[in-house]
Image (cartoon, rainbow, N blue to C red):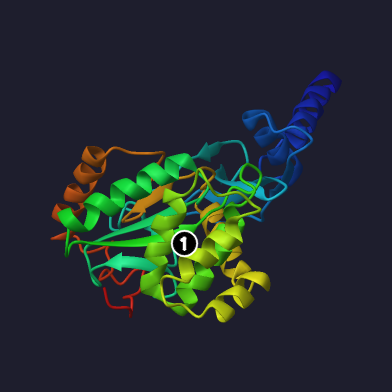
Amino acid sequence: MRLLLCLIFSAALASAQLKTAKDKTTLEAYVRQTFTWGAQIAVAVGDPKPAPMPGYVEISVTGSAGNQSQEEIFYVSDDGQKIIRGTVFDAKANPFKQNLDKIKADFTSANLGTPGAPVVIVMYSDFQCSFCKAEAKLLRENLLKSYPKEVRLYFKDFPLEQLHDWAKSAAVAGRCVFAQSPEAFWDYHDMVFDKQGEINLANLKSTVQGWAATKGLDSLQLNRCIDQKTTEKEVERSQEEGRSLAVNSTPTMFINGRKMTGSLQWDTLKQVIDAEIKYQKTAKNAGEDCGCSIPLPMLAK
């Protein structure tokens, strides 16, 4: 009898000591081990919230170092013994709805193309990134020529400050240009990428001033905006939005919510766009007229 009681007690004790991933300390240790996040990475584990499927809770874990951060979503079973990392799809909704719900693409963002288009491309870019320069050139040369009415493109600032010393300043200046003239922003966009190899932190402002003088912009207003960093918060909101979408490199674009990273060839992009145009003819659950999180822009083409 004594032996039986000891066995029962031991089993109960082992069960009580069984680690649960719903415990923040336990989940943090598990995530650190999974991603090899050392002590230099600060880890924040969120509170559990209802998951999109029964029997699980959803917990976000964010790792950060300086201005860089990475969010991961985990689904933990109710007993805390199973962990799922990945995306849960609802068969009744757009497969990329979770991304669409996080993207704010409206008339406050630089954009071009047709309002109400069935395909929306949101580009997170860095003016000092050579891959972004190549992708920007590809889009500017091909997108509206191939899809004059079917696509809307939004430009989002995502300067990689730890790698590029003047990227954020260029983003701030670009937003200052946009505040004066949304149409002039795209000339600015092309100019900065064209002169990327010539620009540095010391000559960025003078380069912008020389360009602005040829565009009929209010130089005093533009200089004041740049000097006072009036648009810096807008750039930082764009960065934060990107981080919420797990953007950690540039260029990164979302085509109707579908995440695509790196410098892509036109044939690849065209294949995805064509597929979305076809799909949206019946689905109508992703473009600017879908009623999701991307409202109809108020700016004309």
Name the residue at the top extreme: 3
Task: Please name whichever residue, 128 or 86, is drawn nearer the observer in this view of the structure.
Answer: 128
Image quarter hosting the N terminus: top right
**Identity of the residue drawn at 28% across and 78% down:** 300
Residue 1 lies, with reference to residue 187, above or below; the image says above
Query: Does residue 264 appear in the picture of this structure?
Result: yes
Q: For residue 115, what is the image quadrant?
A: bottom left
**Identity of the residue drawn at 33% across and 76% down:** 297
Residue 80 lies, with reference to residue 59, above or below; the image says above
**Identity of the residue drawn at 79% across and 35% down:** 39
Query: Does residue 293 appear in the picture of this structure?
Result: no
Q: Position of residue 14 (x, y in %)?
A: 76, 29
211 sits left or right of 92 in the view? right
Q: Position of residue 72 (x, y in %)?
A: 57, 45
Task: Please name whichever residue, 146 or 283, is drawn nearer the observer in this view of the structure.
Answer: 146
Residue 53 lies, with reference to residue 235, above or below; the image says above
Residue type, numbered disc 1 = Lys
Image quarter hosting the C terminus: bottom left
214 sits left or right of 38 in the view? left
Task: Please tell me how crowded label 1 is: few (under 14), some (14-19), or many (20+) other residues with Cα within 10 Å.
Answer: some
Q: Position of residue 226 (x, y in %)?
A: 61, 70
Secondary structure of the residue carrying numbered label 1: loop
213 sits left or right of 297 in the view? right
Name the residue at the right extreme: 2
Q: Which residue is mark 1?
A: 102
Task: Please name whichever residue, 215 or 270, is drawn nearer the observer in this view of the structure.
Answer: 215
Q: How many marks?
A: 1
Q: Position of residue 35 (x, y in %)?
A: 63, 31
